[in-house]
Amino acid sequence: MKTPHNIVDITKHQDETDKATTKTSQSSLSSIISSIRLSNKRNAISSNLCNSVQNIRQRISNEVIKCDPHMYWHFDLKQRNDATDYWTNGCVWVGEFIAVAIGESDLVNLIDIRHRSVVSTFYCDSEPFSITAIADVEYLMICLPDSNKIDVLTIFDRCLTCVLEIDCEVPIFDIVHLYDCVFYGLASIKGDLYEIHLDGLKLSKVVTSESIKRALRNAKKLTFNKRSTILYVTCCNRNRNKVVGITANWEVKFVYVHRYLRDPYKAAVHMSGFVLLTSEGSNAVHVVTESLEHSKIFLRGHLCGPRAICFNDTQDKLAVVDSTPGKELRIYNLQTVATSLECGAV
């Protein structure tokens, strides 16, 4: 992995502009690493506090996720003229905002939920294929494979601001946080997975089996379940639509296939243990267990080509973004209940 943009050896002679850029870039990288490590400590403390209620999570087989099909809130992405094409490649919920990566138009919109408006637009050098929140959503990582780089954004004064650009040796289409400052980067063109270390900016290829490489070549997105250490890969090609679960010892242990799973794009892990999958081709959201066992399908008939999906901080609300004619961001109420609910279930 190359060093971040504009970072140069400050021991060499250079003008004040170069020095300022160098200090800013290196300071940004240090701040990001510090924030990630602080977030890890907070999450470790929270995990220990929650150990007493782990038995509640073990009752997942007797629980279902209840979704209110009546929208809590919606936003029409077409009302903003910056984006002429709306091919949503991901979204993340950041406090009172939702950031949406829009392909074709090569931008990221920051939407204020309370005021129902786009308050900031960040223009990328190329198509943003994914958007990932890190350090308790203090920073956003934007994968730009056509530019062989990853932009790191933050929200400052209600504005999306790029604080770091990381040049990569290969096109990275998606990225997930594993632990500390270590990430997995998806290089789907050749079916490769790279381990990325922000501390030191090292990038190394992960040796995987041929079955995993086949899954990665057809991969759309990665999602890492930190609680069960399972890496979910949404796969889509002409003949097969599936989601695979890869364990920590690099075994394809779980596979989800369903007749109504068409063009799966993104997975989102709920704290109850359920995993929600967007099914773009069937206009629905599939709910499965951590081991990718089918639970139900909901919101069928309420969506139109869903690709992006995310939860709020408390995970009692779900945001889904369409990618075909409606171009709408929809928010629904969620809750986990001990009795089954038919909400378009199959």
Image: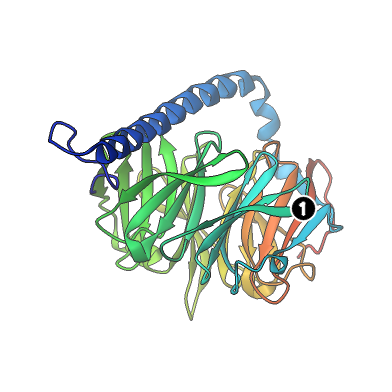
Q: In the image shown, does 110 or 214 lie closer to the viewer?
A: 110
Query: Position of 199 compared to 99: left or right?
Result: left
Q: Is residue 306 visible?
A: yes
The amino acid pointed to by label 1 is: Arg
Instruction: Name the colouring of the figure.
Output: rainbow
Residue at the image position 12 percent from the left and 35 percent from the top: 12
Q: Residue furthest right?
A: 70
For label 1, the crowd category at 10 Å Cα-Cα, with few meaning under 14, some 14 to 19 and many 20 or more, is: few
> Which element carries disc 1, helix, strand or loop?
loop
Viewer-closest of 60 and 151: 151
Q: Residue at x 50, y 75 (%)?
A: 240
Counting the numbered discs, the total is: 1
**Extreme residue in the left direction:** 12
Is residue 275 in view? no
Picture layout, residue 300 above or below residue 253: below
Above/below status of 239 relative to 220: below
Return the x and y of residue 218 as percentages of the image width and height.
42, 69
162, 2: nearer the viewer: 162
Q: Nearer the viewer, residue 36 or 254?
A: 36
> Against 49, is 138 above or below?
below
Return the residue found at the far front.
15
Q: Where does residue 62 sit, x and y in percent of width and height?
A: 75, 42
Instruction: List x then y, in percent, for residue 114.
Output: 78, 45
Q: What quarter of the picture does the C terminus occupy?
A: bottom right
Q: At x 51% / y 72%, what residue is drawn?
A: 104
Q: Is residue 107 left or right of residue 187?
A: right
Q: In the current view of this chain or complex, which residue is farthest to the bottom?
A: 238
Residue at which label 1 appears: 116
